[in-house]
């Protein structure tokens, strides 16, 4: 090979190499999504907003938005790639039930068992889900199935949002999942102003009776009875509710401690990592697909008008859910005698962001009375909200799937 031939060979290969680099394939949309990923990581590390969720999701957003030339089988949407296999757990919906198994194994339902009426607060908070569903339909932008998947964001339950979107609107899963986890992380920011807005100074000082002691028999029977009651009503909630109550039975039976420890420790940690990273990576800014009807290449990436609508509707649904829980407590108090009234500051805990929303009830309560501890009371509607969001998901699946 002569000198000129070598130079030509070198230039051709350098040009080919350049075409494969991220610099060549970079678009402004990639830059926007990388910035979003960095914001998530910043909020997790600097502000301690749900770090176990936002760090994996934020890093996944960075991974999903490294520009590359298609055909290398490295992208999450490229069939046969490692990332696509990991994403199957989200796409086929088998990560969320494993998350619910771990949640069940670490949840103590004693507060709910000792004061069953508080389950109504968790039920009332599900107005956020159905309210957002109705609003999404009214916009005319979304189909019924898409509206149902978006509405579940109001439950502030990331795994449930992923599960139902995998069934009803898999093409919107990235936006729905990121929106749900974002609002879960922002519980300490969104809920306190609403709690102050909808309560009076006198209501914030209400003291509740200490919860009674719950026997071991009651704790063992609860997941069995809860399973049968909920799933006979909404069998479509079986994957989530079944694993939630199974995990709780492992915890409360007293004879399966090793299994319970695995479910609430290594298993849920591994699944959280895989779910967070792959959900983040699914927010690919540019995703070119061929329209089967027109044959024209269109972009189905994350940055679309529908994604913006989803984030706005997610905020609306979360506000409705929080307000509904608080206002329902105020309604209940109209029929309760003095001394038996419920502090409406625990109404916010009806959303299923466990245990963050219950902690907010405690924090706001202590602001007005340093000796009024609401955490144990707030945990009852909080865990009821987990059950309620899964039931609501089952109801939506029953008539939309």
Image: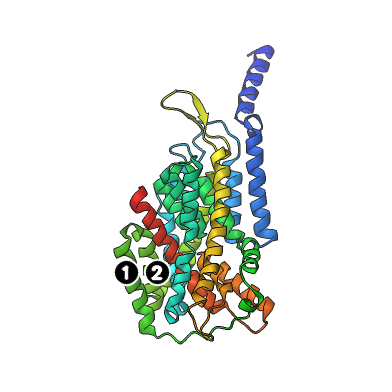
Image coords of residue 315 (percent x, y) = 58, 53
Residue occupying the point 53% across, 55% down: 317
In the image shown, does 322 or 94 lie closer to the viewer?
A: 322
Q: Is residue 275 left or right of residue 19?
A: left
User: Disc 1, disc 2: CB below 8 Å?
Assistant: no
Give the class, few, some or many, for how many residues have Cα within 10 Å of label 2's Cα (few <14, many ≥20): many
Kindly state the secondary structure of the residue where label 1 is placed.
Answer: helix
Task: Kindly indicate the quadrant of the structure image that contains residue 144.
Answer: top left
Name the residue that disc number 2 marks.
247
Query: Which residue is under mark 1?
Result: 229
As rendered, which of 326 and 122 lies closer to the eye? 326
Q: Which of marks 1 and 2 is in front?
A: 1
Compared to residue 15, the image places residue 357 above or below, namely below
- Earlier in the chain: of badge 1 and badge 2, it is 1
Foreground: 362 or 223? 362
Q: Is residue 274 visible?
A: no
Count every numbered label the image shows and give the total: 2
Q: Who's the residue at 37% across and 75% down the image?
A: 256
Q: Position of residue 225 (x, y in %)?
A: 32, 73
Task: Please indicate whether residue 135 sits to the left or right of residue 48 in the image.
Answer: left
Residue 72, given in percent of the width and then of the height, sits at: 51, 33
Q: Please tell me how crowded label 1 is: few (under 14), some (14-19), or many (20+) other residues with Cα within 10 Å.
A: few
Q: In which quarter of the image is the N terminus?
A: top right
- Residue 357 vertical placement versus 144 (above, below): below
């Amino acid at each position: 090979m002569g000198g000129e031939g070598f130079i030509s060979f070198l230039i051709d290969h350098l040009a080919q190499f350049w075409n494969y680099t991220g610099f060549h394939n970079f678009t402004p949309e990639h830059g926007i999504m990388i910035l979003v990923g960095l914001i998530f990581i910043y909020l997790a590390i600097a502000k301690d907003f749900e770090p176990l969720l936002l760090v994996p999701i934020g890093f996944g957003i960075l991974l999903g938005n490294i520009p590359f030339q298609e055909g290398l089988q490295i992208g999450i949407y490229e069939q046969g790639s490692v990332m696509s296999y990991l994403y199957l757990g989200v796409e086929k919906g088998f990560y969320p039930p494993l998350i619910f198994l771990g949640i069940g194994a670490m949840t103590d339902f004693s507060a709910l068992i000792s004061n069953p009426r508080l389950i109504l607060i968790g039920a009332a908070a599900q107005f956020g889900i159905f309210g957002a569903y109705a609003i999404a339909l009214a916009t005319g932008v979304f189909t019924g199935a898409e509206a149902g998947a978006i509405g579940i964001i109001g439950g502030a339950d990331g795994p449930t949002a992923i599960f139902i979107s995998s069934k009803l609107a898999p093409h919107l899963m990235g936006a729905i999942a990121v929106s749900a986890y974002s609002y879960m992380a922002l519980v300490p920011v969104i809920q306190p102003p609403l709690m102050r807005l909808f309560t009076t100074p006198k209501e914030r000082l209400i003291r509740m009776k200490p919860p009674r002691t719950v026997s071991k028999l009651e704790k063992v029977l609860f997941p069995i009875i809860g399973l049968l009651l909920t799933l006979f009503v909404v069998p479509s909630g079986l994957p989530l509710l079944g694993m939630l109550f199974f995990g709780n039975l492992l915890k409360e039976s007293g004879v399966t401690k090793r299994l319970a420890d695995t479910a609430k420790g290594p298993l849920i940690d591994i699944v959280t990592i895989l779910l967070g990273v792959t959900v983040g990576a699914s927010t690919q800014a540019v995703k070119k697909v061929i329209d089967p009807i027109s044959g024209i290449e269109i972009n189905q990436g994350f940055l679309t008008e529908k994604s913006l609508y989803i984030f706005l509707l997610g905020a609306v649904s979360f506000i409705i859910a929080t307000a509904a829980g608080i206002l329902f407590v105020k309604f209940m108090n109209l029929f309760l005698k003095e001394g038996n009234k419920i502090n409406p500051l625990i109404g916010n805990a009806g959303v299923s962001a466990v245990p963050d929303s219950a902690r907010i009830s405690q924090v706001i309560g202590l602001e007005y009375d340093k000796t009024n501890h609401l955490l144990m009371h707030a945990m009852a509607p909080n865990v009821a909200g987990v059950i309620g969001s899964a039931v609501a998901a089952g109801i939506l699946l029953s008539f939309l799937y």
